[in-house]
Image (spheres, grey):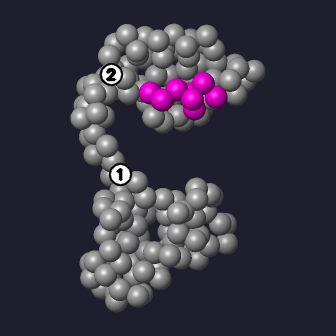
Amino acid sequence: MITKRKALHTMEPLDQTDRKILALLQTDGRLSGAEVGRRVGLSQPAASARILRLERQGIITGYRATVDPAAVGLNIHAVVRLRTTHAHLGAALQLAARTDEVTSTRRVTGEDCLILDVHCGDAGRLEQVVDSLARFGPVSTALVLRDYPDKPLMQYRPTGA
């Protein structure tokens, strides 16, 4: 099991092969080392060694299954923005962490402090979640009409790379 941690500041730089491996695994984390190697032009042992190095460096932080929320009865997806004070931030983060319907939490700059993805089975439960967050400050809610696939992170090159 890979534990989530920050990438080491002294890590080896990523080359094009590492970037290709990362893009492949972000698209399909179940690819075998042999298949990854075939797609990037490496032997299975060489590809597996690179994957292990990327895991050890904290670049690959884990593998997971992606679940369709609607297929499990969570038909409402909302983005909730919370504006709070520094004094209430910790309590708001704790509430978000223990609320099952909150599937992601981002602390952001600007007028809002937190942006949360919320998946609920019905509007009544969304109302309860929003009301529980509103005790920490003004809340703004937007219903998501459609989700589009995420792009693999490693198809982009950071400036200077």
Q: Secondary structure at mark 1?
A: loop
Q: Which mark is residue 121?
A: 2
| Horizontal arrangement in the rendering, residue 156 relative to residue 1 (left or right) | left
Q: Position of residue 101 (x, y in %)?
A: 44, 27
Q: Residue at x 52, y 59 (%)?
A: 61
Regarding residue 144, the answer to whether it shows in the image is: no
Q: Mark number for residue 65? A: 1
Judge whether residue 5 is colored magenta.
no
Q: Is residue 19 above or below residue 139?
A: below
The residue that appears at 43% across and 11% down in the rendered structure is 127
Where's residue 93, x and y in %? Answer: 62, 29
Q: Choose the circle earlier in sequence order: 1 or 2.
A: 1
Residue 5 drawn at (x, y percent): 62, 57
Residue at image coords 27%, 82% = 38
Whether pointer 1 and pointer 2 mark residues with C-beta atoms closer than 8 Å, the reply is no
Q: Is residue 20 above or below residue 157?
A: below
Magenta span of residues: 94-101
Q: Could you tell me how far apart the alpha carbons at marks 1 and 2 are, in whole angstroms?
A: 20 Å
| Residue at the image position 41 percent from the left and 88 percent from the top | 45
Q: Three-letter amino acid code at disc 1?
A: Ala
Q: Amino acid at mark 2?
A: Gly
Q: Seen in the image, is 75 located left or right of residue 95?
A: left
Q: Secondary structure at mark 2?
A: loop
